[in-house]
Amino acid sequence: MNFLNLHTVIESERCILKVAKLKHAEEMCDLISDKITTFMPWNKCKDISEQKDFILYQRTETERGNMYWSSLFLKDWKMIWIFWVPRIFHKTKTLELWYWLWEEYWWNWYIHEILECFKAYIYTYTDTENIIIKVSMLNKASCKVAQKAGFHLDWVLRKDDYVKWKFEDVAYFSFTKEDFKESRAKKK
């Protein structure tokens, strides 16, 4: 399955999505708050060295095609978001998408904006058939973002994930290549 790589850059009107570099480690560390990590499956890195190791891991796995990990920057290169494709299912041409936006940017529609560009890129330049977003049911804002971006709520699995020492119900949203074609036809 053709996919994104270290050099892929996706741009929207206000944002740039690209793989972070080591020079972004300090900024990334500073942005991750306790409020954000509530919905993350991991904790904040302890120091810059650990964050740099994490960035190197992300870059290596992205280069190998095992996942895609990038950051969202405003046009002035201020980082505001983590964007992660943790699983790529080559047989079914499906990718799973996760995202986190730093809390000071939550209500500015950046995620919706870049999701539209991401879908266009994926369905124009790759052979992906389906994009899945998994969201904790506790994260109402992320559920709304997925729906606003045209993703369909397919099901909710109770106690499907174990995060921060507790089970959580998880909503599964999907957006297919056919959905993309239909949305493009409606815009014409």
Image: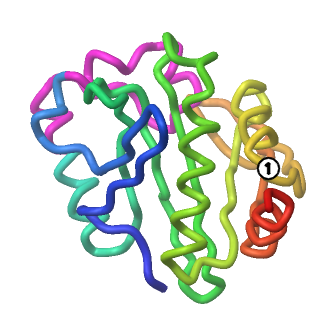
Residue type indicated by callout 1: Gly
Count of labels in the image: 1
Q: Is residue 100 left or right of residue 78?
A: right
56 lies left or right of 8: left
Residue at screen point 63% across, 74% down:
94
Magenta stretch encompasses residue 139:
no
Residue nearer the viewer, 128 or 185 = 185
Q: Residue furthest front?
A: 188
Q: Is residue 119 above or below residue 124?
A: above
Q: Position of residue 124 (x, y in %)?
A: 56, 74
Residue located beneath label 1 in the image: 150
- Colour scheme shown: rainbow
Pinpoint residue 22: horizontal percent, then vertical percent: 12, 40
Tell whether position 44 is magenta: yes
Relative placement, left or right, of 77 versus 152 is left
Q: Secondary structure at mark 1?
A: loop
Q: Position of residue 126 (x, y in %)?
A: 51, 78
Q: Residue at x 46, y 13 (%)?
A: 34
Tell me what residue is drawn at x 40 percent, y 28 percent: 43
Vertical placement of 133 versus 3: above or below? above
Snapshot quadrant of residue 72: top left
> Which image quarter: residue 169?
top right
Please determine whether, in this image, residue 179 is positioned above or below residue 52: below
Q: Residue furthest bottom?
A: 91
> Which quadrant of the figure contains the C terminus?
bottom right
Q: Nearer the viewer, residue 138 or 150?
A: 150
The segment highlighted magenta reads 27-53
Q: Residue at x 64, y 41 (%)?
A: 162
Spot occupied by residue 62 in the image (x, y as percentages of width and height): 31, 64
Up/down of 1 relative to 159, above or below: below
Badge 1 crowding class, 10 Å Cα cut-off, few under 14, some 14 to 19, many 20 or more, is: some
